[in-house]
Image (cartoon, coloured by chain):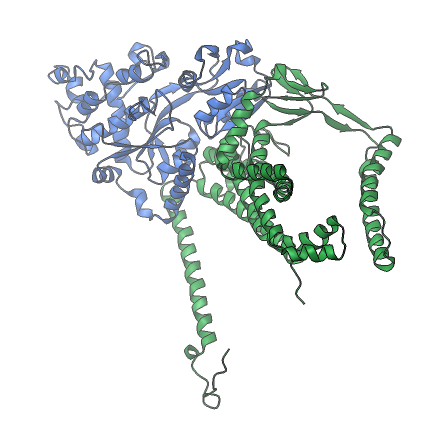
Chain colours: A green, B blue
Amino acid sequence: MPVRPKVHSLGPKPPFWRDRAKRALTFQLLLVAAVAAFLLYIIGNTQDNLAARGITTGFGFLTNTAGFGIVQSLIDYSSQSTYGRTFVVGLLNTLMVSALGILAATIIGFTVGIARLSPNWLIARLANAYIEIFRNIPLLLQIFFWYFAVLRAMPSPRDSMTLGEVAFLNVRGLFLPEPQFLSGFGFIPLAFGVAIVASIVLSIWNRRRHEATGKRLPAGWISLGLILGLPLLVLVVTGVPVTWDVPELRGFNFRGGFTVIPEFLALWLALSIYTASFIAEIVRSGIQAIPHGQTEAAQALSLPRNLVLRLVVVPQALRVIIPPLTSQYLNLIKNSSLATAIGYPDLVSVFAGTTLNQTGQAIEVITMTMAVYLTISLLVSMFMNWFNARVALVER
Amino acid sequence: MRDNNNKWLLLGSAAALALGTAAVASADTLDDTRERGTVQCGVSDGLPGFSAPDDEGEWQGLDVDVCRAVAAAVFGDSEAVRYISLNAVERFTALQSGEVDVLSRNTTWTATRDTTLGLNFTGVTFYDGQGFLVSKDLGISSAEELDGAAICTQSGTTTELNLADYFRANGMEFDPIVFDTSEQTVGGFEAGRCDVLTSDTSQLAALRIQLSDPNNAVILPEVISKEPLGPVVRQGDDKWFNIVKWALFAMFNAEEYGITSDNVDEMRGSEDPNIARLLGEDGNYGEAMGLDADWAYNIIKQVGNYGEAYDRNVGMDSPLEIERGLNRLWTDGGIQYAPPIR
């Protein structure tokens, strides 16, 4: 800031409209007041309009009985449940497909993105073809493809594809045996927890020892062995306290076991594959953004290839990757609302669809739905910003 | 994409409710339509027999004929209609916010809709009931054998509620597969995603002929609900309410007195006082509604009486071939009945 001569320093205090800071504050207050007044006017006007037209308003409908069925619910739900519960059911279904979609899209995206840079001509071309195909076809068409094209190819329940007569795949979905836990099963999660704690302790100890003496243990492999082996050992020792509820064909369809509905499979596949093609490009650009000199310098220190990637390239690439990756995650969550086209009971289908129509309270329902997507997106964004700050290059 | 447009329409309608002035609520729909020169009519997103565009892009159907009758009464021109295609979810919001003047879209008259949405049903164009369509391969002859079935239905309809009620009352289980449009619902049924397609029986007849193999599908005999379908208008504009209500009554009365689109000109000279009053030869019953004396003449001349509209769109002269059944006039053993014009 240029230093201004203080001509008034000895005179009387200037009036507030001559003071830049106070003037700015005044205008900001005026703006906030105007926005608040506008919002109040809209809310009041809406209520007047609704009242004048004899339309019921308010959130009382949330405690009324819904009276319709939902095909997939993560919590107890029947047609006798309330509209409030349909909201939760829809929300959980949206969160489930989004979370699993983000997981799968990240794994596929990173794999394809790295494969795109492979020195192997065939692998690089295949990865390139994957990206160009799935990135350039509209998502809704891809959802329809997975749902209607793939669904039609599936057999009817009576001639299902089966894996050892315990898992079945047909046009109604994927039917898996469901474990029923008997008493004594509680030791297995306990063993799992112990193994994880032990692995963490091991890795800390290993790092300190490495820094002090230069000696290292293959801590990754030992941890993996612990995490898998300990629960398995306990499982065998306690005499396998699990029975399996195997699905069987009764009447129209399989009963028992665990069902993955085809709507979920189609939506999840389409979202993951579509978003992964964008993530792959983000990963590729992130890696290519690291100057080759960095790799060469690391190699000159005779670091092995995997350490060059892990210690030099990836940490720097992540700085480039994470901000656009966040956008892709947010896109995936919002795109999951296309579920309504194929009948997956997500928030938009169940709440902004059926519930809205049964109650007719469009404004309340749409507001709640928009608020949910906004909240989820802001939370994801917050988390990714925090993560980005952690991996950001610390300049000294 | 039409679906995206529809979402925007819904949001737009909500915004109209938020931003529009309260004065709109008491606006005179008749004046607005006159000023605009067309009646804006909310119809379905394609249901043959009720409202669907034909191969020349002209909307046809029983519900469409109600729109045309209103336009004939108001303008003397049944073509002065702008059709707005609405899916089940957005239809009421579109009417509430004034996107459409009348909703004529196979909509079931229920207590909730009539009382809490700020809407009024003007009458019943079609007495319907919910039924089940199944593939012949299943070898099923009654809805009571449907325990455990996967059932395809359309989102935002009374169908979803009736279905849950029926299966609960009969102690049976089912998996509801809910689609956005009737097109997708049929797609799900054809792909084998569900054993059963459920909707109003009239719609099932229409959807059945859209299947790739209609002969392999049967409609089960059970009708599990009452579905009186009719046109809907906004509450608070009684003049417009009267016009839409009496446009339909005129069609019923015309059939009762034997007036058709072919003989309406001869009938103008009829000695029967009922006919003379309906056609505006004796007294002016249009005036009190803000219409011309020949309002009913225009409806009958250009759209026809109720029986003609029924036969042409959903009855024996149409591919749907739905029996008149309950929809016969009271004089023929049905329950369609219109108050007299006097």
Residue toward you, A328 or A185? A328
Which residue is rendered at x = 22% and y = 18% of the image?
B254
Q: Is residue A33 visible?
A: yes
Judge from the rendering whether residue A201 lies leftward or rightward of residue B195; answer left or right: right
Eyeballing the image, is A288 above or below A28?
above
Picture coordinates of residue A231, whole percent (x, y): 83, 36
Picture coordinates of residue B2, whole percent (x, y): 40, 34
Picture coordinates of residue B340, whole percent (x, y): 24, 21
Which residue is rendered at x = 47% and y = 71% of the image?
A25
Eyeballing the image, is A10 above or below B137?
below
Placement of the C terminus of chain A among the 4 image quadrants: bottom right
Picture coordinates of residue B281, whole percent (x, y): 12, 22
Q: Quadrant of residue A177?
A: top right
Judge from the rendering whether residue A217 lies leftward or rightward of residue B163; answer left or right: right
Judge from the rendering whether residue B98 lies leftward or rightward of residue B277; answer left or right: right
Q: How many marks?
A: 0
Q: Is residue B221 visible?
A: no
Which residue is rendered at x = 41% and y = 47% of the image?
A47
Residue toward you, A172 or B279? A172
Furthest residue to the bottom?
A: A10
Eyeballing the image, is A223 above or below B294?
below
